[in-house]
Amino acid sequence: MPVEEDTTASEGPPAAVTATPAPDARGQRRRIPSHLAWAALILVVALAARSLWVAYAPSDPMDGRIFSDPVFYYYSAAHVADGGGYIQPLTGADTAYWPPGYTFLLTGLFKVLGAHVSIAWGVNIVLGALTCVALYYLGRLVAGRTTGVAAGLLLALFPGHVFFSSLVLSEVTFTFLVVVALLLAALAARRGEKRALWLLLLLGVTIGAAALVRGQGLFLIPLAALFWLLQTDWRRALRWTALAAVAAFVVIAPWTVRNYFVMDAFIPISTNVGGNLYVGNFDGATGHMVPGAGEWARDRYSYLPPKEQEVAMNNRLLREGLKFMFTHPGREVELTASKVRGLYEDDEEALRGIPNRQAGETIPHAARIADVANVYYFAVLALSGGGLLVWLRRPRSALVLPLLVIAVFTLGQLPFFTDPRFHYPMLPAFALLAAAGLVAAVDEGGRRLRRNGPTL
């Protein structure tokens, strides 16, 4: 198979069975496998970095800030945990505007531990650190142990990845599920048809869960299909994609049914698609967020009850956004360039959302921290070009997987508006490519040194 095996040293044949094992045999049995040792190191580094950051710059959605995503996620989870329904906290009306996955994750923990914002921070710290460990194992699968270790450590210390630990937002949970899905897809490619069955079902469940956290989770279906097409054959890729997709939609279906009966409309996941599409495609579009862009639709349907207004607005804005896209092709080309720039222009978005700016709060040394974050971010992006070169030398390599992540998630975002926050799920892919480029450069330097000898 094109997926590379990890080439670690064998521990040798088992020792002969004796009444009292030899000291060396006992030592071998007690030795922690190297992959677990590296995973533990990455986990500790990642947990420490995120814990220290949350202690330095906590962000509390209950601090009186204006209504925003963190405010919704906290109050909706607390309300459901208290026995209420999934509602819009401002109106008390049923809603489907936000995908429910992150809210329900917090709800389960709030029921057991109480509705404390520290629970949300703890979720981010743990899942952010586990994302780094999952990336390490993914790196081992697609490019070898050394690349996996480098990728895990790069992400563990990635400032832009660490900063989101303070925010009650779905990005950390979503990105964890994305990396787990990639790991499952890569594992399936190494297995035979029958041995891959349970991996494919688990992958489908993971994709469904990711889509319920953020709708972009559905991008993982075509992404996996393309990866398997390049790694196996089209028939197997088609069968595997169909199985994973069915499992994903089984996970999503109960929420779709809830929306049909509660919202009186067919809403697969959420009602924010229309508004997000319209913001990226209307006369005043810039490619970025335009505050108040769709408020005319709210006024247009102000006579309706809140939940009916939500559905009507989504449908109307979706139609208007699509109409603009198909009737202004030249403008769409201009907007595409702006959207790509807006998606990748910096890596300090989390720093803008942590303080309560309405109360005049700031993060100590925010400007210097932002500079460090951006230097790290752009350095990783530059180094990821080395990973691209590594793949170009071996285009059948499974290292194509992080490239597919970047391509699919970037293209999938372009019909909507963009924001630097939206590149967050792609940071593990950039870290993996950068690690591959670094390892290749070090290996090449070592070969040249051995060939030419040291020079004075």
Image (cartoon, rainbow, N blue to C red):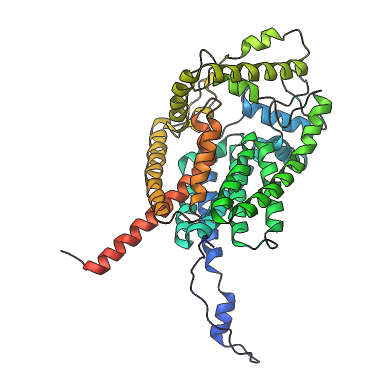
Which residue lies at the image location 45% right of the left edge and 53% below the top edge? Answer: 395
Q: Nearer the viewer, residue 23 or 174?
A: 174
Q: Is residue 203 left or right of residue 49?
A: right
How many circles with numbers are drawn on the protein?
0
Q: Position of residue 81 (x, y in %)?
A: 78, 35
Q: Is residue 439 left or right of residue 183?
A: left
Which residue lies at the image location 59% right of the left edge and 23% below the top edge? Answer: 277
**Can residue 41 be seen by looking at this rendering?**
no
The residue positioned farthest toward the bottom in the image shown: 19
Residue 113 occupies which quadrant of the picture?
Answer: top right
Q: Nearer the viewer, residue 18 or 216?
A: 216
Which residue lies at the image location 56% right of the left edge and 39% below the top edge? Answer: 165
Q: Position of residue 247 (x, y in %)?
A: 73, 46
Q: Position of residue 320 (x, y in %)?
A: 62, 16
Q: Quadrant of the C terminus?
A: bottom left
**Can residue 418 be seen by looking at this rendering?**
yes
Q: Quadrant of the N terminus?
A: bottom right
Q: Is residue 317 placed above or below 410 in the rendered structure? A: above
Q: Position of residue 321 (x, y in %)?
A: 59, 19
Q: Nearer the viewer, residue 94 or 257?
A: 257
Q: Is residue 22 left or right of residue 7?
A: right
